[in-house]
Image (cartoon, rainbow, N blue to C red):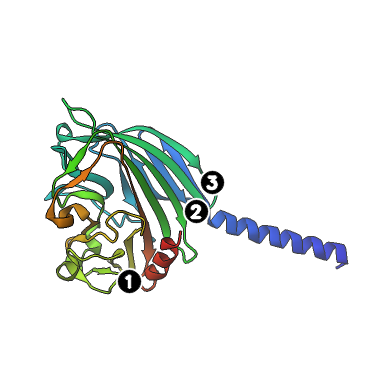
């Protein structure tokens, strides 16, 4: 082989490897009707659903490495648990969490795809919190990004900026902010594990505890997979205490443990910004290096 041909082969090989790696990290956002689908390496990761007939926008399914959803929808006793979602009860007398649109609803005003087809996909969603017969108390803007970590987990970043359109009072409630409802297969009641950053496990030892992150995982066949929620240190109330249930619900919920045991009051025109990172992973929290991933997140 002559020198020119040798270098040509090398260049083609490098180009091929580069293209393969790029294809392996491709994340696409596709908007169809009232949902945006996030597709990672050709497979559906999640749908972000923002139908005007729903209580609020939410993610479902949230597919793990097995290609089955690690979250579940509207279990019999808790129909207001919509997989992976953001809402709040007790807001100026309205309920933007539990079933019943007439009690309060978070309506999507627009959804724009900002980035797609590369190593991450990013969308922006603007919402208004409405209830019949009263002025809207909150308008929010959400930035949602999906990518992959170096270790193969799928990473979903959720940032929401909540603008207070009037003085807002949130009464003490366990129904508040970012939350996940796991598939029953992965819940503690079915042999799964729920663990926080301090290594405490299960509802009994994690309920009401402040911790930067929480992971819930369990077995499907001979494989283990799960979902972790990380709180960014810039969040108000960080680290918020967790409302946990062994049947598979967990949420960093500051409104259930308000400061000085008083209702939460936010003045008109204030903007409350909250950031969360979701990691959907194979293995347990050690395999997925959740602690190390949090260390990266808190420095961003």
Name which residue lies at 46% across and 58% down. Answer: 300
In contact (CB < 8 Å): disc 1 and disc 2: no
- Percent of width and height locating residue 256: 16, 54
- Element type where label 1 sits in the image: loop
**Real-space CA distance between mark 2 and mark 3, rounded to the nearest whole angstrom:** 10 Å
Q: Relative to the observer, which residue lies in front, 81 or 233? A: 233
In the picture of the structure, the residue carrying the numbered disc 2 is: 41
Q: Is residue 44 above or below residue 127?
A: below
Name which residue lies at 32% across and 47% down. Answer: 59
**Label 2 packing within 10 angstroms: few (<14), some (14-19), many (20+):** some
Q: Which mark is residue 117?
A: 3
**Which is more N-terminal, label 3 or label 2?**
2
Q: Is residue 177 above or below residue 6?
A: above
Q: Which mark is residue 222?
A: 1
Q: Relative to the observer, which residue lies in front, 51 or 208? A: 208
**Real-space CA distance between mark 3 and mark 1, rounded to the nearest whole angstrom:** 33 Å
In contact (CB < 8 Å): disc 2 and disc 3: no
Circle 3 or circle 1, nearest the eye: 3
Name which residue lies at 42% across and 58% down. Answer: 154
């Amino acid at each position: 082989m002559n020198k020119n041909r040798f270098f040509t082969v090398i260049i083609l090989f490098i180009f091929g490897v580069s293209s393969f790696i790029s294809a392996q990290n491709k994340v696409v956002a596709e908007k169809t009707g009232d949902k945006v689908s996030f597709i990672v390496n050709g497979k559906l990761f999640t749908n972000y659903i923002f139908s005007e007939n729903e209580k609020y926008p939410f993610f479902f399914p949230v597919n793990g490495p097995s290609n089955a959803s690690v979250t579940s929808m509207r279990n019999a006793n808790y129909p207001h648990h919509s997989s992976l979602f953001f809402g709040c009860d007790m807001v100026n007398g309205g309920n933007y969490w539990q079933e019943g649109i007439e009690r309060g609803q978070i309506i999507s005003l627009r959804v724009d795809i900002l980035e797609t087809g590369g190593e991450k996909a990013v969308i922006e969603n603007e919402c208004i919190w409405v209830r019949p017969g009263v002025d809207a108390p909150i308008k929010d803007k959400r930035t949602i990004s999906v990518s992959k970590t170096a270790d193969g987990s799928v990473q979903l970043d959720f940032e929401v900026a909540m603008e207070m359109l009037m003085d807002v009072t949130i009464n003490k409630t366990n129904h508040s902010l970012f939350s996940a409802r796991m598939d029953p297969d992965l819940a503690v009641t079915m042999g799964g594990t729920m663990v926080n950053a301090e290594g405490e496990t299960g509802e009994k030892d994690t309920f009401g505890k402040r911790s930067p992150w929480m992971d819930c995982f369990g077995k499907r066949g001979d494989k283990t997979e799960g979902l972790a929620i990380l709180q960014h240190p810039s969040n108000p109330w960080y680290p918020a205490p967790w409302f946990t249930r062994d049947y598979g619900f967990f949420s960093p919920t500051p409104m259930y443990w308000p400061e000085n045991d008083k209702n939460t009051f936010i003045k008109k025109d204030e903007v409350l910004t909250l950031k969360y990172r979701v990691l959907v992973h194979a293995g347990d929290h050690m395999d997925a290096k959740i602690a190390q991933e949090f260390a990266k997140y808190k420095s961003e």
